[in-house]
């Protein structure tokens, strides 16, 4: 039997594990929080270490994202629908602004700062403005937040192409690393294949990890120890959902047009996984590199990267391995690593549901990294030492 991963015991769990109110707290701030994928992974790791998570502040500009976040983390002290710049508006290296002083007072001690700034400007799919998009500068808002809050741990998540950013001259990643190092943090960054963390999906993310002085482990040691080396396939993630039906939007099968139904039936009838060119739309025929479009998933392999287009086979390899349909929202959430107890019911439409799930960060990312950290360190140590170091 293969070794277990942090997601094994919770993926199919319908009730959220209880938290011991008397356990030692780990306080976090989550910026560009989305629906809470990074927070959920941190919570899973913290609970596995017999501690409890305190959410001092979560911020996202999308109202629907914060609605989902609040539903799943009802004890969070502050969940704000606003721009991150509304809380951290100063320049790197400058004295704290009045707004930042208020944020610091209202937030209190922070052990872990999480951030998943918008990645569209870095994405290789964004051909018009990639690497020079103004959104790329939002990456540095997380660094400014670290400068103000002085957490013990900083984690910033983004697409691998963030390393190629040209907006700030030397690039946001290098600038972030230099500034955090100047504040006294040990900093490293890696591109992580999430299928090495037990996620049944081929997805790569860039992680910048910074630890304050005093932690008995370094970022590179955490990166090296985090992979489980257990590859999970699609059957492991969604094999039990074959007969999931009903009126629940999470389990409602996407409706395909006649042409796509015929394409899917052809793949099933001929036991094929890639659609022949002659059966593709004319615009997708001829020489192309989009084999995954209109493709069928395999039970014994991870899924391709889940996006908000998972409900259409014209958006990628999203056809179910055994049925003539694309993936349901429930299946996509499972592939992302969200357990059944995570509640997406605040999403009022199929489109909103697809966007929320497709844009989410798989929680196994923070769970794996923080499982290593919490086994070696105590990130809830008070930040007075760090504050004294910076003010000295």
Image (cartoon, rainbow, N blue to C red):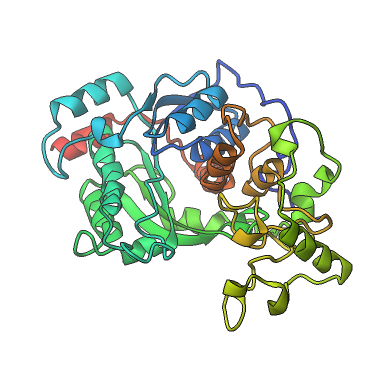
Does residue 165 show up?
Answer: yes
The one nearer the camera, 143 or 378, is: 143
Relative to 290, say whether 302 is above or below.
Answer: above
Q: Position of residue 306 (x, y in %)?
A: 60, 54
Residue at 59%, 46% in the rendered image: 364
Q: Position of residue 317 (x, y in %)?
A: 66, 62
- Left or right: residue 112 compared with residue 333: left
Residue at 14%, 36% in the rendered image: 391
Q: Residue furthest bottom?
A: 287
Relative to 294, say whether 97 is above or below.
Answer: above
Quarter location, residue 55: top left
Q: Residue furthest top?
A: 22
Quarter location, residue 386: top left
Relative to 213, say whether 81 is above or below.
Answer: above
Residue at 33%, 30% in the rendered image: 82
The one nearer the camera, 320 or 157, is: 320
Image quadrant where one finds the C terminus? top left
Does residue 298 show up?
Answer: no
Q: Position of residue 69 (x, y in %)?
A: 50, 29
Residue at 82%, 49% in the rendered image: 239
Image quadrant where one finds the N terminus? bottom right
- Left or right: residue 122 compared with residue 313: left
- Left or right: residue 95 compared with residue 317: left
Q: Position of residue 193 (x, y in %)?
A: 56, 61
- Left or right: residue 326 compared with residue 268: left
């Amino acid at each position: 039997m293969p070794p277990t991963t942090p997601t094994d015991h919770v993926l199919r769990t319908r009730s959220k594990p209880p938290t011991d109110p008397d356990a030692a707290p780990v306080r976090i701030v989550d910026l560009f929080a989305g629906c809470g994928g990074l927070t959920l992974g941190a919570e899973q790791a913290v609970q596995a270490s017999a501690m409890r998570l305190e959410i001092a502040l979560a911020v996202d500009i999308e109202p629907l994202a914060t609605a989902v976040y609040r539903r799943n983390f009802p004890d969070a002290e502050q969940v704000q629908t606003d721009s991150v710049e509304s809380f951290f508006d100063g320049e790197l290296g400058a004295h704290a602004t009045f707004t930042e002083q208020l944020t610091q007072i209202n937030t209190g001690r922070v052990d872990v700062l999480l951030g998943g700034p918008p990645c569209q400007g870095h994405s290789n799919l964004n051909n018009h403005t990639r690497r020079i998009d103004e959104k790329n500068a939002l990456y540095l808002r997380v660094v400014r937040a670290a400068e103000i809050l002085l957490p013990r741990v900083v984690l910033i998540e983004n697409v691998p192409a963030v390393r190629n950013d040209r907006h700030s001259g030397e690039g946001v990643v290098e600038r972030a690393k230099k500034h955090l190092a100047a504040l006294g943090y040990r900093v490293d960054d890696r591109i992580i294949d999430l299928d090495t963390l037990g996620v049944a999906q081929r997805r790569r993310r860039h992680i910048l990890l910074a630890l304050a002085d005093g932690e008995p482990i370094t970022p590179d040691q955490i990166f090296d120890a985090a992979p489980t080396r257990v590859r999970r396939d699609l059957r492991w993630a969604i094999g039990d959902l074959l007969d999931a039906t009903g009126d629940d939007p999470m389990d409602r099968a996407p409706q395909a047009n006649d042409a796509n139904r015929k394409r899917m039936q052809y793949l099933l009838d001929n036991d094929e996984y890639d659609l022949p060119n002659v059966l593709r739309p004319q615009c997708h025929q001829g020489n192309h590199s989009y084999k995954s479009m209109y493709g069928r998933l395999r039970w014994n392999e991870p899924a391709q990267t889940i996006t908000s287009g998972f409900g259409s086979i014209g958006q990628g390899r999203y056809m179910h391995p055994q049925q003539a349909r694309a993936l349901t929202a429930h299946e996509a959430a499972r592939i992302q690593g969200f357990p059944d107890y995570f509640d997406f019911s605040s999403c009022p439409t199929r489109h909103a549901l697809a966007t929320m799930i497709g844009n989410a960060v798989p929680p196994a990312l923070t769970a794996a990294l923080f499982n290593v950290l919490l086994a070696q360190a105590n990130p809830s140590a008070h930040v007075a030492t760090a504050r004294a170091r910076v003010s000295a």
